[in-house]
Amino acid sequence: MKKFVLPAIILVATLALLAACGRDSNLHGSWEWELDSTYVYTFNSNGTGTRGGAAFGIDNFRWSTPGNGVLRLNFTSGPMFNSAFPNRQDFTYSISGNTLTIVGEETWHYTRR
């Protein structure tokens, strides 16, 4: 039984590292839109998140940062989760201090809460 403990620990550690790969830890937390504090992105450390607000509805998503400044959102429910919009959207992003800039069809700036 003892000879299975070390491999089990190594397996669990490896799976934990793989689960964390592809997520920029600098994104963790909540960010509010600089023009309207009722629109907020929240990035959880487990790769889930929300965006929106009471006036806009709340989108739930899984997020990753596959590289080259790309932020990938896979919507799981909410206004963006319907046939009119693609369920996956890629944006470019950057973080400078407490400002998150997301670029898609437009450029949006968010401030860390």
Image (cartoon, rainbow, N blue to C red):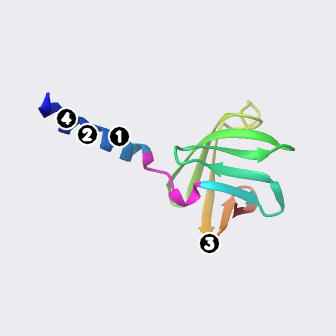
Residue pictured at 74% horizontal, 34% vertical? 78
The image position of residue 81, as x and y in percent, is 71, 33
Determine which residue is flagged by label 3. Answer: 97
Q: Secondary structure at mark 4?
A: helix
Determine which residue is flagged by label 4. Answer: 5
Residues under labels 3 and 2: Cα distance? 37 Å
- Quadrant, the N terminus: top left
Determine which residue is flagged by label 2. Answer: 9
Horizontally, residue 20 falls left or right of residue 41, namely left
Badge 2: how crowded within 10 Å, few (<14), some, or many (20+)? Answer: few
Q: Which residues are magenta?
A: 20-28
Determine which residue is flagged by label 1. Answer: 15
Badge 3: how crowded within 10 Å, few (<14), some, or many (20+)? Answer: few
Circles 4 and 2, Cβ within 8 Å, touching? The answer is yes
Circles 4 and 3, Cβ within 8 Å, touching? The answer is no
Q: Earlier in the sequence, mark 3 or mark 2?
A: 2
